[in-house]
Amino acid sequence: MKDKLYLMIPGPTPVPPAVVNAMSRPIIGHRSAEFAALIGRVTDKLKKVFQTENEVFVLACSGTGGLEAAVANVVSPGDKVITLNTGKFGERFGELARKYGADVDEIKFGWGCDVDIRVVEEKLKADPDIKAVFATHNETSTGVVNDIEGLGRLTAQHQAVLVVDAVSSMGGMDIRTDEWKVDIMVSGSQKAMMLPPGLAFVSVSPKAWNVIEQNKAPKYYFDLIKARKSLGKNNTPYTSAVSLYYGLEAALDMMLEEGLENVFKRHKLLAKATRAAVMALGLELLPALEYASDTVTAVQCPMTVDVNNLRKTLLDKYRVMVAGGQGELKGKIFRIAHMGYTAKADVLLTIAALEMALNECGYKAELGAGVREAQLVFLGEDN
Ligand SMILES: *Cc1c(COP(=O)(O)O)cnc(C)c1O
């Protein structure tokens, strides 16, 4: 028998049994009254998690499809836009915007750093023609959280719409779409939302609709105006991912039952324990503590340890899967996710396995030192 797999990567993440059960229900017609009622309920519940009164669309695609939908509907060829690059996913917004013909000003803040709002402010002041600002809330590749509230305060004073990638934070962190004045918020199913891969979620503000209605980019599947027309009748333009909707409702019910406040608190606590544990082992975090993510912790791999060997040891010996670095951080960091269907015991187990794997890879980690620090956090007895 293969040992149980502990999926501690930032997506796809473990799916709760209640969600798996819901998805095994018989398929119904996607144009039936029953399915329309489901879309209506799911939309209302999604709005609660997004903390928005705006429409929230459910698209059948991965998170990047949601990002592409945002870009395709906002960017007309030749538009000036700003993309904020704090890692792999911020970089992706730049790539997408260029594909759709935007005149892109890509601001690079360094991978491991957060967005410096003053830089964005100067750019917006200098050029009133800027049409959109594309930002990442939780930069999964670096474990950095950006100040979306600050960016929203800024873009609200300008013509530019604010488009935010919250794929790896929605469902795990307190994201106030309306209060923060985010025009388009994008998320996906397989991170903190506790679902399998396959869905993207996109909310659209009235300010964004004004831009979308003028948009001249070619698009078909991702046409949000068509999606709006359909959603008005609790429908989708093309075949809905019926089973994933079943799962989505079950996952949303779990979150709302736990209480969003408690969901956010749980993620904060797991992140705090993970950070305390790895630091107790003498390892360094990639981002500064003040903007470290609640859903994924990026750890600098000690120089003497081969990160691939460490990950392989964790997986082969203990069946604990953590992620490596992406792009320029490949070989330099590893990432432990603590998002979605994750609890204290998952963190304790991961840290225990990490302590053993580090020793097996030639790094002298004191056995139990990280676990103890995490335990103290969970007992509320840390410092
Ligand atoms: C996972 C992720 C995405 C989307 O990735 P897909 O593989 O297309 O689902 C986008 N942005 C961030 C921040 C992510 O973590």
Image (cartoon, rainbow, N blue to C red):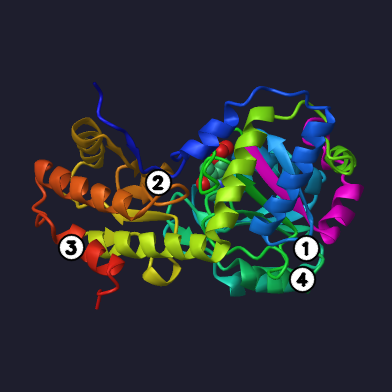
Residue sitting at 26 percent across and 38 percent down? 311
Q: Are marks 3 and 1 in contact (CB under 8 Å)?
A: no
Q: Amino acid at mark 3?
A: Arg
Q: Amino acid at mark 1?
A: Ala
Which residue was labeled with disc 4?
A: 156
Tag 2 residue: 328
- For badge 2, the amino acid type reads Glu
Mark 4 vs ligand 1: CB below 8 Å: no
Query: Which is in the foreground here, disc 2 or disc 3?
Result: 3
Residue marked by disc 1: 160
| 4 or 3: tag closer to the N-terminus | 4
Q: Could you say whether the residue bearing mark 1 is in a helix, strand or loop?
A: loop
| Image coords of residue 151 (percent x, y) | 65, 69
- Seen in the picture, residue 4 relative to 338 is either above or below; the reply is above
Quarter of the image with the C terminus is bottom left
Lateral position of residue 24 relative to residue 132, left or right: left
Which quadrant of the figure has residue 331?
Answer: top left
Confirm whether the magenta stretch covers residue 206. yes
Rendering coords of residue 354 (x, y %): 21, 47
The front one of 198 and 359 is 198
On residue 372, which mark appears?
Answer: 3
| 1 or 2: mark nearer the eye | 1
Q: Does residue 20 appear to the left or right of 185 in the view shown? A: left
Q: Are marks 4 and 2 in contact (CB under 8 Å)?
A: no
Q: What range is drawn magenta here?
A: 199-224
Per the model, the C-alpha gap separating discs 2 and 3 is 33 Å
Mark 3 beta carbon near ligand 1 (under 8 Å): no
Q: Position of residue 373 (x, y in %)?
A: 21, 65
User: Is 293 in front, or is 133?
Assistant: 293
Q: Residue at x 89, y 44 (%)?
A: 232
